[in-house]
Image (tube, helix red, strand yellow):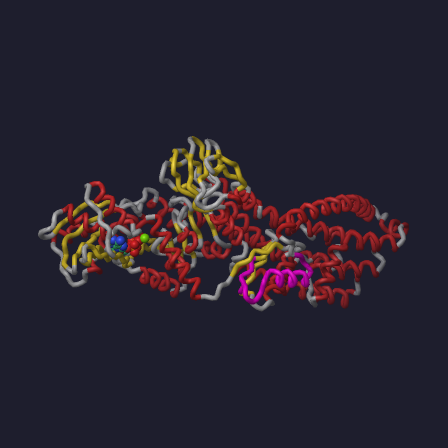
Amino acid sequence: MGPDRHMSETERRTKQATSQPAYQTLDVPIQGMDCVECTRHVERAISDLAGVVSVEVLLGAERAVVRLNPDQVGISDLRVAVENAGYRVPAPETALAERSAAQYARRILTLLFGVFAILIFVVVIGEWLGLLESVSRLIPWQLGLTIILLGGYPVFLNVLRAVRRKEVIAHTLMTVGVIAAVIVGEWATAAVVVFFMRVGDFVERYTSDRARHAIRDLTALSPQKARILRQGDEVEVPIEEVNVGDLVIVRPGEKIPVDGEVVAGQATVDQASITGESMPVEVETGSQVYAATIATLGNLRIHTRRIGPASTFGRVIKLVEEAESRRGGVQRTADRFSSYFLPLVAGIAALTFLIGRDPLATAAVLVVACSCSFALATPIAMLASIGASARRGLLIKGGKHLESLAQAHTVLIDKTGTLTLGEPQITDVIPLGEISEDDLLSLAASAERYSEHPLAEAVRLAAFHRGCMIQEPERFEAAPGIGVLAWIDSHEIKVGNRRSLPDTSLPALVLEKERQGKTLLLVTRDGELLGALAAADTPRADVPKAISELKRLGVDELVLISGDNRYATANLAHKLGVDFHAELLPEDKIAIVRRYQDQGRTVVMIGDGVNDAPALAQADVGIAMGAVGSDVAIEAAHIALMREDWMHIPLLFRIARRTMSVVKLNIGFTLIYNLVGLTLAAWGILPPILAAAAQSIPDLGILANSSRLLHQAKQDT
Ligand code: ADP
Ligand code: MG
């Protein structure tokens, strides 16, 4: 079934590719972004270029993901645009070397900064003890100014760049505050403010870095090298040198470096890196294995199918990294708010100055506001949640989806393969008329030879067990939601449900099977009914528990939707205590999702991603179960569960709600903090030094609050 599925997917892709202009997605490293505002500048600079379709700038990853038309715009244009905006695009080869040079420079700066910090600390204590005045008088203002400029030049540089672009950033206001303090001769105060501005920057960077921790831990699991067979010799090579088709050798305890098929050997494989499942699986010749999983016992020889970023693990990492760019409504609101926030603060500062005539209070207002915290409040929590989830085999493709999931109360569930094991068994073979049971099964299996449907698999398996011959069909067509049509020995053979034979009444013997809740496969030759097969599928064991857990979580509309017959669907729906819609074609499933959406409901759709991909995509949140190894499922769904564990569904709901409550707390905290801070500063109660020192408190609060998501995730199973 594997190869067929891949083939049809490739075909679909090719079709899409030819009907659109050849867009390209570039992943551009960007240096010098310190704050969320910087990302917006870079975003604007790039999106202004002709030929750029879309751009997402990731602060934490220091990258821009740009979709563009390569005929119109290239990497050099991007580089110029980014550099004009005041940031840098390192050349890919030099990026690493430069990064270490930059790290070195940063270390020296940190050291200088430490010295500066001690000095400042002395000054702060000094002010407390009332000695600052004398210090200010003792040290000439020229020296004071030099200290301020030296300590604050990166900030001032950013502000200057922004001014050149006629833009206002958070640091612009603070810089005005510093200037105000210098003008009134409070240069020591100004120096302390500068110092805390730098501390604030550092905290912000640290905060976004920390949030990416879970993702980085994940990336660290990527295989680096592989042992391959070259002209009969085993050689160890870096992973980049492995090609599709290479034979890879894996010894006990080693990491499997590629996705591929086992061609020799047997092993126990720990797939936790992908599925989060700690129970190892047994693999043998013919099994699929995945990069970044670990062979604990036994040797393997693997035929390489996919490597690096193309492997399942590589795609998981990429999707999780891109998740940062899929912002939900809450985040967009917060972003918009932070752009109104600066003018507001400027207004309050102006009022403070005009009414109070107090330059120090004005300076305090300017430095206390922290607009960046608003922009951090959502993504930090989302990143923590998404990263922690990815480690457990829950692949969430964006904060947007968590946001929708947290407010969803309607869940639609596909039946075959999702609620059931998707491994139906043929229970009855009912020939009508001349044909023998074996001939009927043989004919059906030949017609189903190239179908990827689980029912087709069941028919082939039944034929195999009875030793029936399977023939090569002359032609084959799948009719989704109906069955298959094949030409065998110049006869038209159909295998499918009643839709494949609408006008024929069925004998009682056949109808009885249907009433028992079995799925009927009618076999016809040139329009004549030859007989029927009946199939039954086993429901997954953990479904009832998961469903009652969902109900307990307040999901009040649970609906089974299936292409199977009414009886089989009703039977199962009844057992689970949920509603149902049966005998649906794939397009009917989309229509049902829409119908619930039109009633204003946020719809979650759970499927296996194989034949319900369009419905998954239509839903507000499409969740694909058991996605490991299935590209289609990973692609179509908003959330892909790498493991087929139904308890992960209620778990997802809990994660989503917990994440959103952390986000709301983050935003609320920042809001209250700013309100109180601005009020106290405007009243002259909060001196600029304390205002500046308090700057990074919201960032730290957001970080501490959000990292609860990392820790709590470890508690539930
Ligand atoms: P579900 O919604 O339960 O996943 P599908 O849309 O995959 O179901 O299929 C719906 C119905 O179409 C099946 O119950 C079966 O009756 C029929 N069908 C689909 N594919 C095949 C096939 N390859 N062979 C026989 N019947 C099929
Ligand atoms: Mg299905």
In this picture, residue 201 sits left or right of residue 247? right
- Residue 10's x, y, as percent? 39, 56
Q: Which of the 4 image quadrants contains residue 8? A: bottom left
Magenta stretch encompasses residue 479: no
Residue at 48% across, 66% down? 21
Residue positioned 72% across, 53% down in the render: 197
Q: Is residue 305 or residue 123 the one in the foreground?
A: 305
704 relative position to 437: left or right = right
**Going by the picture, which residue comes out furthest to the front?**
231
Q: Nearer the viewer, residue 163 or 659?
A: 163
As drawn, which residue projects farthest toward the left?
434
- Across and down, in percent, residue 614 comes to 37, 59
Left or right of residue 253: residue 479 = left
Q: Quadrant of the C terminus?
A: top left
In the rendered structure, the answer to whether residue 660 lies left or right of residue 595 reads: right
Q: Position of residue 61 (x, y in %)?
A: 59, 51
Q: Is residue 55 above or below residue 218?
A: below
Judge whether residue 82 is colored magenta: yes
The residue closer to the viewer here, 527 or 247, is 247
Q: Which residues are magenta?
A: 65-88
Q: Is residue 415 above or below residue 465?
A: below
Q: From the viewer's perspective, is residue 585 above or below residue 252?
A: below
User: Which residue: 79% across, 62% down?
Assistant: 358
How far from the left and from the top, in percent, is residue 75? 60, 60
| Residue 647 visible in the picture | yes
